[in-house]
Amino acid sequence: AQSVTQLDSQVPVFEEAPVELRCNYSSSVSVYLFWYVQYPNQGLQLLLKYLSGSTLVKGINGFEAEFNKSQTSFHLRKPSVHISDTAEYFCAVKGSYGGATNKLIFGTGTLLAVQP
Amino acid sequence: DTEVTQTPKHLVMGMTNKKSLKCEQHMGHRAMYWYKQKAKKPPELMFVYSYEKLSINESVPSRFSPECPNSSLLNLHLHALQPEDSALYLCASSHPDRGLLVTEAFFGQGTRLTVV
């Protein structure tokens, strides 16, 4: 079975500073990794995904993430954050078992709190 | 069109009521999902439909009854709910995963359910 760990429940950061949100996964099979963002009282929006290929993945709103197989990590980064980036960020994993419609499993989430 | 539309946005119901949540997508996705999200928690998978057939039921109580009448629509019928069932209910859709072909899920804005 696969799982996702987000060690930081909350990350406070000042506006225009860089930020890294950490995500580690556990799986015995090929994995597919995603970062979603959830603004207050909203659904989830896909930021970026790693399915295969280049380990550095660029997403929307200036975010990027790097897949590191040896460290089983998929950390999310942004070089300069804005107040509007304040939201809950979820790392998620799907494992490939060769069947149809694999489960999407979420980490516990990290609240990014951007301060002026 | 990358939208998943959920109605209603808010719902208050009594413990003896019967109500339904609706979800619609026109992206040609043949996998649709129901998630439940409590405050400050990650989404938890409830049901998955693949090609209009129920493929995953995460041991959800029978007071929640899913239905997929066609490839664009997903319903969640609610009956005799408890106050602890109050949560944000999220619908999502994707192409069905096939072996190594894995795709991302698109989420709706959710229905905020309050059981009184």
Image (spheres, coloured by chain):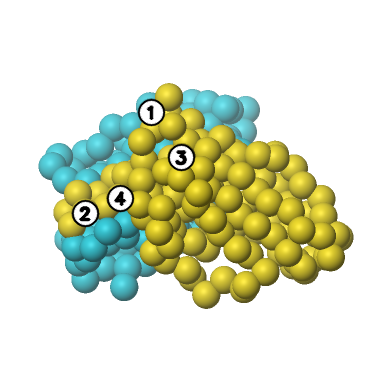
Using the rendered image of the protein, determine whether residue B46 is visible from the camera's viewpoint. Answer: yes
**Where does residue A89 sit, x and y in percent of width and height?**
49, 45
- The amino acid type of the residue labelled 2 equals Arg
Badge 1 and badge 4 both on one subunit: no
Q: Chain of mark 1?
A: A
In the picture, which quadrant includes the N terminus of chain B?
A: top left
User: Callout 2 environment at 10 Å: few (<14), some (14 to 19), or many (20+)?
Assistant: some
- The amino acid type of the residue labelled 1 equals Ile
Between tags 1 and 3, which lies in front? 3
Question: Could you tell me how far apart the alpha carbons at marks 2 and 3 are, in whole angstroms?
Answer: 20 Å
Q: Are dots 2 and 3 in contact, CB under 8 Å?
A: no
Relative to residue B16, is residue A82 drawn left or right?
A: left
Q: Are dots 1 and 4 in contact, CB under 8 Å?
A: no
Q: Chain of mark 3?
A: B
Pick the residue in front: B112 or B21: B21
Q: Which chain is yellow?
A: B
Relative to residue B80, is residue B29 drawn left or right?
A: left
Using the rendered image of the protein, determine whether residue A90 is visible from the camera's viewpoint. Answer: no
Q: Chain of mark 2?
A: B
Question: Could you tell me how far apart the alpha carbons at marks 3 and 4 are, in whole angstroms?
Answer: 14 Å
Q: Which residue is mark 2?
A: B98
Q: Kindly identify the residue that appears in the image at 21 percent across and 54 percent down.
A: B98
- The amino acid type of the residue labelled 3 equals Ser
**Where does residue A95 sit, x and y in percent of width and height?**
27, 61
Q: Kindly identify the residue that appears in the image at 56 percent across and 59 percent down.
A: B66
Question: Could you tell me how far apart the alpha carbons at marks 4 and 2 are, in whole angstroms?
Answer: 6 Å
Question: Could you tell me how far apart the alpha carbons at marks 1 and 4 are, in whole angstroms?
Answer: 24 Å
In the picture, which quadrant includes the C terminus of chain B?
A: bottom right
Chain A rendering hue: cyan
Pick the residue in front: B16 or A10: B16
Q: Which residue is mark 1?
A: A60
